Amino acid sequence: MLTPLSWLKDYVDIDVTPKELEEKLFSCGFEVEESYEVGKDISNVVVGLVEKCEPIPETHLSLCQVNAGAHGTFQICCGADNVKAGGKYPLALIGATVYATAKDHVTIEGVMEIKQGKLRGYDSYGMLCSGVELGLNEDLYPGAGYNGLLVLPEDAKAGDDVKPILGLDDWIFDIAITANRPDCQCIYGMAREVAAVLGKELKEPALDYTADDVKKENFKVSVLAQDICPRYTAHYVHDVKISESPAWMRKRLALVGIGSISNVVDITNFVLKELGQPMHAFDYSYLEGDEIVVRRANDGEKIVTLDEKEFELNSNNLVICDGKKPVALAGIMGGLNSEINDGTTEVMFESAKFARDNIRKSSRALGQSSDSSALYSKGVNEYTTAMAMKRALHLMEELGCGKVSSTHVEVTTGNSLEPKEMKVSIAKVNGVLGIEVPTEDIVRILTNLGFAPVVSGDELTLMIPAYREDMEDYPDVAEEVIRMYGYDHVIPAFMPTAQVTLGGLNLRQQTERKIKEVLCAAGAYEGIHYSFFSPADLDLLRFPEDAPERHAIRLINPINVDLSLMRTTLASEMLYAIARNQKKGILEGRIFELGNIFIAKELPLTEYPDERETLCAGVFGEDESFFTIKGLAETVADALDVKFTYKPAQKPFLHPYQTAEVFCDGQKIGYLGQVRYEICDELDMRVPAYVMELDLRVLSQWYGKDRVFTPISKFDDEKRDFAFVVDKDITCEQIENGIREACDYVSDVTLFDVYEGVQLPPNKKSMAYSVVFTPKDEELKTKKVEGFVKDILAHLKETAGITLRG
């Protein structure tokens, strides 16, 4: 949440530096994710009084003598059309930093340092600045939007730093608000915390207003869904004059990232940021039937919101209606048919509490979000609902926007806005903390937090404000005490039954780390993707309708349709990762991911799905091939000290002749192959891609396999080459296995040539191998090796009809 220091100072006398305040907030449980000065990039810019201003002949430039007080008087060449003698403007001295702008003098293109220059032969010792060059706009400072010099106040003193004059010395804190403190998602809520941590008095915003006798006698409010709208308040304002908001309000809104629209709309946005209560202003002339009805939408009912989007609603959506039609999506956005415009003369203000879960679900289901829905989704309390209406009416009166009538309608479920009493034991509070916090410190802290504590022996009586809905029992009191008392008072200690144990990785973790290490050593990078994917991903992979992969678990409340299914394969995200890399000009690479796929035992779910650990790898590039991805599989096999075998297979998204299933000890563990060309084209890939998936759940039965040490033979290896004539349907694996089965001395078999041609019979091919024989206890003699050769040839001929090529 963006929180300007100047806005906090409206309610608290802050006498510490911004850095000290950041540390104080962190100590009491509010992390400042970022803090920065508004004019952080602006330096060495002072008030310059133009004493002389003469036009340079035949140019649009003026030659100025600028008085910078104690800094001296400087000659400045200036091209602005509003420069004149006697005027006071920001002067960037030599060495100053300001924003560089494009030729349109509006677009900022970075930060530049001012140096001495020469224009049309005249020396210039600095630069007179526009508002844009200081990072300002019309909302942040009046006149900053003009395409010329920023005019400073007449009472500005020459030579003074411009930052305090322009508000550039203000600080912005981006504060992370925890889920249990929705009352702090506003400026005033944070001011309460700042006052408490600094021990300062909290000033209240002005809530007073004067209501006249004008009354809409026939106006009424009906809430037909009080379970999700426990409080709804409406108040009528007449004689409304739509105009620009005052500079101070426009600046406040600009500092928190909201642009000014008009006085009435700005008031609702101001209250939203100041008090954390979303409000809406209806143009009363568009409300038919002198009525507001809060109800669930009818199925198929439609509404067009302020951003001109049309939505079809259902009974899960809450709508605000007049006597005939919906005029707002409750808690999300107003309707286009009742918006405030330049001709608005009467307004009905709305301030309400809606159930956070209903707004959150509706916002997500409709794909429509706003500042209001963000606040309602986290929680808005009824105390603030009532307070915000008073604040808005006060501002209407203060700004002269309209006259506040006596027409005020409030529909509630009877929830009290008064503090509720809570009694807790001091001993229990200290028991939670594990330390003894002095009672006087407990009383001081809880007093600063507005809980009005009263101590009677061990009993602590508190009055909990209605905006602190998170306070339920003594553990909550303990949390409030320790965050203000200081966590550094807690002494680290073991629990009485604690034991020191040795940590470490279990076998699964050790093995998966080993797999990652060997894949990284093979040049692959690890990727991590969401556990969800889109129905379109299954279409991309060409899975038929009855494919197991389409038996996916659908999320009830997905982030969006692209993340609506629990993934049943890692392949689709791997393909997208490869495509993204290629679009960025990375045309070769290797990627792997270890993650879970989710297999439903039945749909709809009646029990937890099977989460299967899976390894997916992808390679791409002109120099990559089917054998590259197979090499990564062999890398994994070597790491586990197992042997993989391969059989031709078909996958709908892989090349029909470059796809194989992977087996380990006869059990299928996955597949690998080349991605089909049409899928590569669909994803705009420029180079071939290959993918592999291995089921680590099945592979886990070989985790931790003991390696057997085999000493290197003292005797030399013997090597023989063979060229076999075989049937075309015989695989390399069959021949290699046959060679190894025929002789126990074979240590390596390598295919080095495959030939098909006219010199061979039809349906035959030639496959040439190098076979290495390794001796065990004695040197291999030629005669013994020849015996090995005869055994191999006989075995291959008998089992597969394989013969030597003549």
Image (cartoon, rainbow, N blue to C red):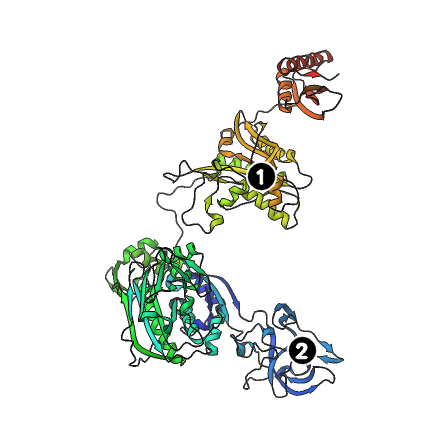
Query: In the rendered image of this protein, does residue 430 appear above or below residue 692?
Result: below
- Which residue is rendered at x = 57% and y = 32% of the image? 650
Closest to the observer, 719 or 392 = 392
**723 to the left or right of 351:** right
Label 1 vs 2, first from the N-terminus: 2
**295 to the left or right of 78:** left
**155 to the left or right of 583:** left
**667 to the left or right of 751:** left
Which quarter of the image is occupied by the C terminus? Answer: top right
Quadrant location of residue 409?
Answer: bottom left
Write down the residue under mark 2: 126
Residue 779, position as x, y percentages in the image:
70, 15
Given the image, on which type of amino acid does mark 2 rest?
Answer: Gly
Quadrant location of residue 262?
Answer: bottom left
Determine if residue 450 is in view: no
> For the residues marked 1 and 2, what is the alpha-carbon distance in whole angstroms?
59 Å
Given the image, on which type of amino acid does mark 1 rest?
Answer: Ala
Write down the residue under mark 1: 617
